[in-house]
Image (cartoon, coloured by chain):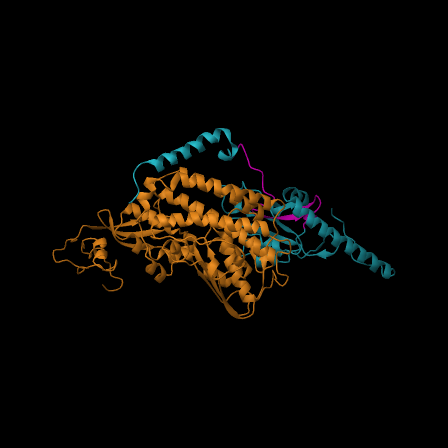
Chain colours: A orange, B cyan
Amino acid sequence: MTAGESITLGVKAVPTTTDNLKAGGSPRNYELRPKSLADGSLGSDLLEISMGPQHPSTHGVFRMDVVLDGERVMKLKPVFGYLHRNHEKIGENTTYLGSMPYTDRLDYFCSLTNNWAYALTVEKLAGLQAPERAEYIRVITAELTRLQNHVSLVGFLLQDMGASGTPIMYAFRERETILDLFESLTGARMMCNYMRFGGCRCDLPPGWLEQAKQVVSDFPRFLDEYEALLTENEILMSRTQGVGCLSRELAVNASVTGPMLRASGVNYDVRKVDKYGIYDRFDFRVPLGEHGDVYDRYMVRILEMRESLKILQQALRDIPEGPIIDPRAKLRGFRPKPGEAYGRIEAPKGELGFYLISDGSPNPYRYRVRPPSLINLTILEDMCLGHHVADVVIILGSVDIVMGEVDR
Amino acid sequence: MSAPMLGQGIIKGMAETARNFLGSYVKDDRLVTVQYPEERLPQKEAARNFPFLVHDGDDWQKGLRCVACLICEKECPPQCIYIVKDAARKPDYTGKLQFQPKVFDIDLSVCMSCQICVEVCPFDAIKMDVEYELSTGDRFDGLLLRKEQLAKSNDYYRKIHPAEAAEVDARLGAEKAKADAKAKATAAAKPSAGSGPVPGPVPG
C-alpha cells in the first residue's frame, strides 16, 4: 500500500486478527487486495465506521476510524486534533510565568501536577530550589490530584461499561471533597494555577491541614465501599479480564508510561526512578499488574490510590513550617540563562515532561510537552484488534486520556 | 473470563448501593447534593473568578488605586486587559500625583481567571472578585466590562476576602504613615520653600 492510499475498500476479509496473531503474525499484518476490484464490487464484508468525535462513549472530541468485520475490530485508526489550541506555540510567545495558567488546561483533571512539571523544568533551567515546606505542599497536592484523577477515571470506566450513573456519582462525590480542598487553597477547583518557579503561590490557609487529614482518613472507607461495589462484580470481571491485553514488550517499545505500563508488569515509576522533589522520603510501594488487561489497569489504579493515601498521611504528618518560595525567584522580568532543561514527573496518567530551551529572553525559545495521554493512546489499535466494538469503548476508557492533553 | 458466575459480587454491590440510598435519608455525608438556586454553599475565602478594580472611599473616580502603569496589561497571558492612560493626573492615597486610566476594559469572555494580574500589580489596585452569576444574552458588550463596572470599593474587598484585605490595608497604611512622616520631615527641613508634596485629599 502506498502512503495516503485508502485501504477501506481494498481490505480483504482475512480470517480474523486473533487467528493471525495465533499463527505468529503481527496484529497489523493485513492481507490487502488490489485497490480496484475487477468486478467493481466492494469485495468484502468489512465496514468502516467513524466513532466520534461526538460519540457519547469517547472521552472528549476523539474520533476512531474503525474497520469492522461484523462486530469485530479489524483496524482502528485514532484521529485527534479537534481540540488543538496551539499550546506549545503560545508557550513560546508568552512569558515563562504566563504559560503557567495554560498548563492547567493541558490535562484539566490534574492541573496541579501539570503546574509542578512545568515549575520543575523552569527551576532546573534557572537553578531555583523550592523550600522544604513548598516541596511538601507539592507532594500533598500532587497526591490529592492523583486520588481525584484515579477515582474519576474508575467512575468513567464503569460508565463506559454500562453502569450508568451509580459508580460515577459515588466517584464524583468523593472527588468533590478533594476539589473543595483545592478551592480553599488555590481559589479554583480545577484551574488551580498554584505553583510558581521556586515554590508555591500562597501558603496553606488556616485549618487546611486538618481538613486534608480528614479527607485522607475518610478516603479508605470510600475505597472499601467502591471495591465492594465493583472489584468482585462478575459482570465487571467478565467484561474486563483478558480484554485489551498489552504485552510488556509492546508497552515498553511504545514508551507507554504510568498505570498503563505498570498494569503490564513493568516496574517503572518516575517517583521511584527520579525521586524528584522529596519523594525519596516517603515509604510507598508501586503496584504492578500481571496481565496488562483492562481489569489490571483498574486494579493498579485502585491500589495506587491506597499508596497515595500512605504518602499523604506521611506528608501531612511531617510538613514543616517555613517559607514557601525561593527568595531568588522573581515574578516579573524573569529571564533564565540560556540553556535547556527537561523536567518530568509522574503525573496520574504517566510521565509528564516539559522540555524548554532558553535563549535568555523573557519567553522560552522552544517549549515542548511530553503528554502521557497522547503516547499511551498510540497503541490503542494493538489493544483493540480482534475485540468487539463494546470492548473498544472500555479499552479506550482504561487508557485514561484527556483530550486537552492529547491535542494540546 | 475466569470469573465464577455465581452472582455473589453483584449482590455485594447491590448491598452497597442500598446502603448509600438508605443512608442518604439519615446521614449528611451520604446526601451531598445542594439544591442550587435555593440553597448555596458558602464561598471559600480564596475563591476567585474575575478581576475588579479597588477604590478607596466612596467616589470611585477619585479613589481608584490604579495608576495605569500597564503592567497587568503586559503580563496578562490571554491579553484580555485594555488600558489607555489619562493625561490628567490625580493624587493617590499618599498624596503623590499619579497617572490614572482613561479606559480600563476587561474582556470576561477572554479572561481565564488566572490571577496573574493581581500578583504582578504593585499598587494592590486589581483584585479577584467572587461573583459568578454573570451570564448575559449579549456576548460581546455584555462581557466587556468598563472601568465603571470594574470599580468596586475597598469595603467590598474586605467583605469578600477579609484576611487578604486586612493584610493589604496594613501594608498600605504603613506606606502612608511613612510617606506622611517623610512629607512632614521635608516640610520641617524647608519651611521657607512652602511647596512640599502636593497635599491631596486623603481617601479612606
Position of residue A287 measured from the top left corner of the image (x, y, whole percent): 42, 52
Position of residue B66 measured from the top left corner of the image (x, y, whole percent): 66, 53
Residue interval drawn in magenta:
B36-64
Name the image quarter holding the N terminus of chain A.
Answer: bottom left
Q: Is residue B101 left or right of residue A100?
A: right
Report whether residue B139 is seen: yes
Q: Residue furthest right?
A: B192
Name the image quarter holding the C terminus of chain A.
Answer: bottom left
Q: Residue furthest left?
A: A39
- Is B63 within the magenta? yes
Q: How many marks?
A: 0
Say which residue appears at 48% left-offset and 31% top-offset.
Answer: B24
Q: Is residue B119 left or right of residue A18?
A: right
Q: Compare residues A385 and A183 and report the one nearer the observer.
A: A385
Q: Compare residues B49 and A161 and report the one nearer the observer.
A: A161
Q: Is residue A158 left or right of residue A50?
A: right
Say which residue appears at 45% left-offset and 42% top-offset.
Answer: A223
Report whether residue B81 is seen: no
Position of residue B91 measured from the top left corner of the image (x, y, whole percent): 73, 53
Q: In the picture shown, does residue A27 fall above or below B144?
A: below
- Is B69 within the magenta? no
Position of residue B115 measured from the top left corner of the image (x, y, whole percent): 58, 52
Q: Compare residues B135 and B145 and report the one nearer the observer.
A: B135
Q: In the picture shown, does residue B158 fall above or below A353?
A: above
Q: Compare residues A197 and A51 and report the one nearer the observer.
A: A197
Majority secondary structure of magenta residues: loop
